[in-house]
Amino acid sequence: MSASDGDVLGQWPAIEELALTRSRGLPVHELLRNARPTGYDTELDTLKLTVRAEKLNKSDAESLRNCVAKACYQVLGFQPRLEISAGGGARLDVKVNSSVRNLTSTSASADQDFLTSKKIPAGADFGHFVVGPSNQLACAAAQAVAENPGKAYNPLFIHGGVGLGKTHLLNAIASKLLPRMPKIRMISCEEFVNRFVAALKNGSVETLRHELRDSDALLIDDIHFLAGKEQTQEEFFHTFNHLYQLGKQIVLTSDSLPRDIPNLEDRLISRFHWGLAVKVEPPCTETRMAIVRKKAELRGIEVPDEVVHFLADNIVTNVRELEGAVVQIAALSSMSNKPITLQLAHDALRHLVKSKPAPARIATDDIIDVVCEHYNVRMNDLLSQRRTKNLAFPRHVAMFLTKELTQLTLTEIGSFFGGRDHSTVLHAINKIKGLRLKDADLRNELERFELQLRRPVS
């Protein structure tokens, strides 16, 4: 395939960005950063590159050809021949030929639709966000930003694992700001990178730059997607500075702290820490139960307590999966015309919840034996309904260890410990968790119990 000189040279910035990303970590990365096209032979379909080096060995030249050729294919749709030469001269700058600015049509209205989000998903507001110990700080910070943009925490950097509510908080902030700020730019980082590469390709970077910098607030999801993308990082750096200096609110989400994002420039890491970085942790059992109830309420269905506990005990790290579980249970109930029961929940989520092997009774007995011996109480008393102080504390410790070291559910633990309900077990576990944080002696005791129980039997 043949292309004009303007087509290829004009799209070099987009080719370079993709080639730099592909070469990250390779010895030729620095060479590629200083490579510049000096011409394109339309008859031979040959792109001529010059790199700043005294000489170029065969291996480096081949690596450069590989990276550039694949980037060319992504941008141009074909791979031109590459002629690479070494030169010690100054870095050459390629001017974009105005004749290729509209090779890929990107209208202002398309950019506007892409960057301005006025379609917040139903329920993605603060009222529908279930708050617990795992996300309380992040939610409070998000609300503060929504009420006092540009002044409370700027930037606000929310990080945590997949499906824990980061995007929900981003939408909630946008929802709160939109009535007062018409120019809210909310965008995923992947879309931003893709649009920036397209803008490099068709010469519309200035239009994209204007759209971003004309924002009242800029909200970007999954900013870790910037990793390794040098020109995109450069563009975002200047956009960040522009908005920050004008006091415009910036909110970013990521799967990790800025310093833990690989191949992210130090100057961006520094700026991301200028405001507040908050982490969203996996929800605790009570929060997971509250999420299940909230999702069920939104769908107008009633979920029995035992099903709520089943979901909270089995789906422990992902809020999105909890919501999906509620949807699947509701769908199976509706299609089969059966009430929602524990058995129906098992049937609906057979593919999601791995069946747990029946816990060995001996493990629980061992826990009780160790606790009883240490606190000098009898097993029958520990499992009885008596609530004297000398029994209550060892019982709480035994319940805590049983939850930590076995696969029993709260309901099963309660049944084992004298027929107590799940809420009593949960209270006992949380009490020990709280004491463990404050009491070093208890912390050491628990560690010794665990070591003793895990020690192989000789």
Image: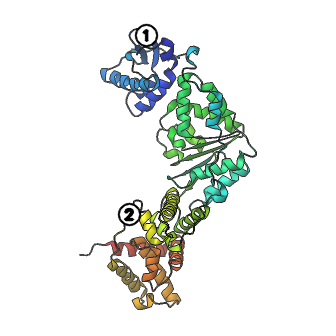
Residue bearing mark 1 = 42
- In this rendering, is residue 307 above or below 18? below
Q: Quadrant of the N terminus?
A: top left
Disc 2 marks which residue? 354
Question: Between 58 and 184, which is closer to the camera in this rendering?
Answer: 184
| Left or right for 282, reference 354 | right
52 or 182: nearer the viewer: 182
* Residue type highlighted by circle 1: Thr
CA separation in Å, label 1 and label 2: 60 Å
Q: As drawn, which residue projects farthest toward the top?
A: 43
1 or 2: tag closer to the N-terminus: 1
Q: Residue at x 45, y 14 (%)?
A: 3
Q: Is residue 379 above or below residue 333?
A: below
185 and 223: which one is in front? Answer: 185
Against 182, is 290 above or below? Answer: below
Kindly state the secondary structure of the residue where label 2 is placed: loop
Quarter of the figure that contains the C terminus? bottom left
Residue 79 on image: x %, y %: 39, 21
Q: Residue at x 66, y 32 (%)?
A: 211
Answer few, some or many: residues within 10 Å of disc 1's Cα (few below 14, many 20 plus, some between 14 and 19).
some
Residue depicted at x 48% and y 17% = 8
Name the spot of residue 150 as percent of width and height, x first: 71, 44
Across and down, in percent, residue 425 comes to 50, 78
Q: Secondary structure at mark 1?
A: loop
Q: How many marks?
A: 2
